[in-house]
Image (cartoon, rainbow, N blue to C red):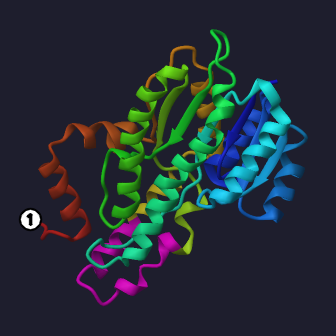
Amino acid sequence: MNSILITGVSSGIGYGAAKEFARCGYQVFGSVRKQEDAKRLKAEIGSSFIPLVFDVTDSNALQIAAKEVKATVGDRGLAGLINNAGIATSGPLAYQPLDEIRWQFEVNVIGPIAVTQAFLPLLKARRSPEKSSRIINISSVGGKIASPFIGAYVGSKHAIEGMSHSLRRELQLHDIDVILIGPGAVRTPIWDKDSAQDMSRYAKTEYAKPIQAFQQYITGIGRQGYSPDVVGRFIRKVFETQTPKARYAIVPNPIRNWILPLALPDRWLDNFIGRNLGLLPKR
């Protein structure tokens, strides 16, 4: 049985992926931050799911979890690691508290590196012509297309994109592949949490009305998003692809939400966004 570790499985993309890999015969180690989530997921997913209680920013907890996984998998090691855990914060960068921006990067950028370092020996353990390991880093449309008012989140995903390419080139030495997957809108609780939704502190700034328009836009996009189960299946198929690409996108309405924004000159996109959100006067 192949074993895989997925971080951030209590809900959203991680939950969808954990269920999918378990359904397809993998032994799934999944990280959560709360013991009650560990018990709930164990009951829901079944015996092939092994919860690990740790926060990706807690280096001591990561080392304990790595020892726990090693004791279970032994010399067969891990077939894969999916760095999914993350948070989203929001606000205009001109006013967003620096501590909040630092925490965004601590969780979304430093966290995946820390997890990779902690579990890399178990990924190396599978090195053979038939049994190389893979790391999948979950990025976002925001890793390529920058929306206003989520600049810290976008910055963290841009960082993951760049570091994943560097890591993939470094890990060629160990025959470990690194793949990026950048989902678009997904019906996930990440945007429902206080860190992403509380814009009231900016109500007295010049951004009050554009922020309101942006929140309405994000809500509408979220309602059209893929379910976590659909994204989970996509991740599993990418993981099992014999010769995968370096990066994949899974974006609803891809022409409007992915292909065109990438094709347009940056200044054209600036104007389109600015006029739609009230950051520029409408003609």
Instruction: Report the span colored magenta.
Output: 195-216
Q: What residue is at 54 percent from the left and 22 percent from the top?
A: 174
| Residue 226 lies in quadrant | top right
| Residue 80 lies in quadrant | top right
Q: Is residue 271 above or below residue 162?
A: below
Q: Residue furthest left?
A: 283
Q: Which quadrant, please, contains the N terminus? A: top right
x, y (%) of residue 246? Answer: 43, 26
Instruction: Tell me the amino acid under the disc marked 1.
Output: Arg
* Between 215 and 181, the one nearer to me in the picture: 181
Q: Is residue 63 above or below residue 273?
A: above
x, y (%) of residue 133? Answer: 62, 24
* Between 31 and 245, the one nearer to me in the picture: 31
> Badge 1: how crowded within 10 Å, few (<14), some, or many (20+)?
few
Secondary structure mostly taken by the magenta-highlighted segment of the chain: helix
- The reply, left or right, for residue 273 in relation to residue 256 is left
For disc 1, the marked residue is 283
Instruction: State the count of labels.
Output: 1
- The reply, left or right, for residue 39 in relation to residue 201 is right
Q: Which quadrant, please, contains the C terminus? A: bottom left
x, y (%) of residue 30? Answer: 73, 47
Q: What residue is at 31 percent from the left and 58 percent from the top?
A: 147
Q: What residue is at 51 percent from the left and 72 percent from the top?
A: 195
Q: Is residue 48 magenta?
A: no
* Between 142 and 30, the one nearer to me in the picture: 30
Residue 128 can be seen in this image: yes
Q: Residue furthest bottom?
A: 204
Q: What residue is at 40 percent from the left and 46 percent from the top?
A: 141
* Between 34 and 278, the one nearer to me in the picture: 34
x, y (%) of residue 251? Answer: 45, 40
